[in-house]
Every structure is written in structure tokens, then in C-alpha cells.
Image (spheres, rainbow, N blue to C red):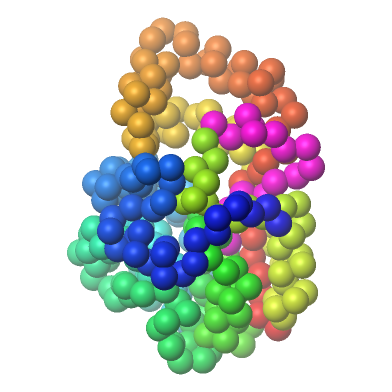
Amino acid sequence: LHCIAQMRDREQRITEMEDGGHFAGGQMVCDAEQHFEGEVIQQQRFQTLVDTTRRFAPHGKWLDIGCGTGTFIQCAQASGIVCEGVELTPERRSLARKMTGTRVYDRPLEFLNLAPESFAAITLINVFSHLTCPTETFSHIHRILNRDGIMMLHTGEIGPGVRRGHIFSWDLGDHLYFLGENTIDVYAGKLNFRLIHRDKNWQPATVYTRARFKMRGRSKFRDFAKMACLYAPGVFPVLRWYMLNKKHADNPIFNSTLILRKE
């Protein structure tokens, strides 16, 4: 497990989120409109995650922690699933409620006192790195999952030999923890989960795509540079080839979809 110095506690994180942004070198997270645009661009990815979760989840209600503007919930609802959310950023939470018409909680899971065994599946998409205490969060998830319920994580896994340049910006302070290679197996054994599915995709291959380059981020300069690469003839294919075959050839980071069943 990789973590950073100057760890944020839960109260600091709640304050940062309620103020509309994370601690990340003074940078703000994308506003709700930008975040929604990014989710729409990645809608097929959310649908794939819904389909994967359905393969393993028993019948029942889902909870999406860190639901953003609600695109994953919408995909679940379109598949006939009742799904609620948790989102700490006010603008995103408001838009998620509007788009989904479902309950979206405004406090961390640890503060909600939800009934035991009340959800069939709990999902965390790009959320693990923001948790202030993963062990405590996973323990609460275990408590509120139904018998044979599942937790679905979509997050990064970092193998040996990682270097600073393998990610353009680590956004430390916003991101607090990173899963090491097979660390999830340790969590599973410690907290009475069983890892039943792992789908790994090489992170550089998911970053250097046209869809990702179309998404706006924190930096207007970087957004401009990405658009220039996309629309200048021949530039993007060359850039992608160079990044995947030269600069990141030894990159040990994967984006993984992990399914853990409650035991």
C-alpha cells in the first residue's frame, strides 16, 4: 500500500469536499458541469462496470460511494436496479439527485448508520485513493452488505518499479492512498471478503485515448494542449505510440476492476 505524508483526517476531507474541492496543491477539482461532461464521455465504461457488477451481485439494492454526478447510477437504473449514492461535493450531489431522482447521501458512509445487510452491492469507482481510512470504510461496507453481497472497486494497482514520471500528476493531498500489487488480497483476508474477480487494464493504454483527451481537467493549459494533439493531423497517433512504446514501456500501473464477496 502506498500512502503520502501529511495525511488528511476525515474532518479535514469533509471540509475540503463541502467547500467544493479537494486539497491538491491548492488546485480545485473539476466543477459539476465539467465532471458531468467527463462522465458522459465515459458512459460506456460505466455501463461496462454495471454489467460486471450485475454478473456477481445477488438481487437487491446498490449503493455507489463517490457517485459524482450520477452517471453510474443512471446506467444501473436503466438495467432495472435500485441504486442510491454517496457524494460529498455539493454541486455534484445536487446534479446527481436531479439526474437520477434517487437518494444521494451527503455524509461519509461511516457517519450514516445504515442498517446492517441493506445492500446487495456497494461500488467505489476511482474512490479508493481518496479514502482517509480504507480499513474502516471497508469494515462499514462489510456490515451493510447482504449475505453474499459484493463490493466492486475500480481503482489503480501499482506494481514494483513505479517511478514519479509514470503518472503526469499524482495530485497528492487529493489522492491519499494507492493500492500496491495484490494489496487488495490482504484487505480481503483481514476483513472477511473474498476476491472473486480481477480485471486489469494497463493504465497508459487507458490514458492515451481520444476519449480521455476530450475530457476537461484541472488545467486549462493542459486541456488546450490535449485538444491541439487531437485535432492536429497525425499528432495523436504518434504521441500515443511514443507514450506506450517508449516513455511508459516499463510502467507498472494498472486500472483494475475488483469484485470482493462478503464472507
User: Residue at left 32%, top 72%?
Assistant: 106
In the image, taking residue 120 as reference, residue 181 lies left or right, namely right
In the image, taking residue 139 as reference, residue 175 lies left or right, namely left
Q: Looking at the image, which is closer to me, 1 or 150?
A: 1
Query: From what the image shows, is residue 135 above or below residue 159?
Result: below
In the image, taking residue 141 as reference, residue 44 lies left or right, namely left
Query: From what the image shows, is residue 146 above or below residue 151?
Result: below
Residue 189 in the image: state x and y as whole percent: 77, 74
Q: Which residues are magenta?
A: 153-168
Residue 100 in the image: state x and y as whole percent: 27, 66
The quadrant in which the N terminus is found is bottom right
Query: What residue occupies the far top of the structure in this picture?
Result: 233
Q: Quadrant of residue 145?
A: bottom right
Q: Looking at the image, which is closer to me, 171 or 84?
A: 171
Q: Looking at the image, which is closer to me, 21 or 151?
A: 21
Q: Quadrant of residue 105?
A: bottom left
Query: From what the image shows, is residue 204 above or below residue 63?
Result: above
Query: What residue occupies the far front of the structure in this picture?
Result: 6
User: Residue at left 39%, top 25%?
Assistant: 222
Query: From what the image shows, is residue 167 above or below residue 87?
Result: above
Q: Quadrant of residue 214?
A: top left
Residue 157 in the image: state x and y as whole percent: 67, 50
Q: Is residue 260 visible?
A: yes
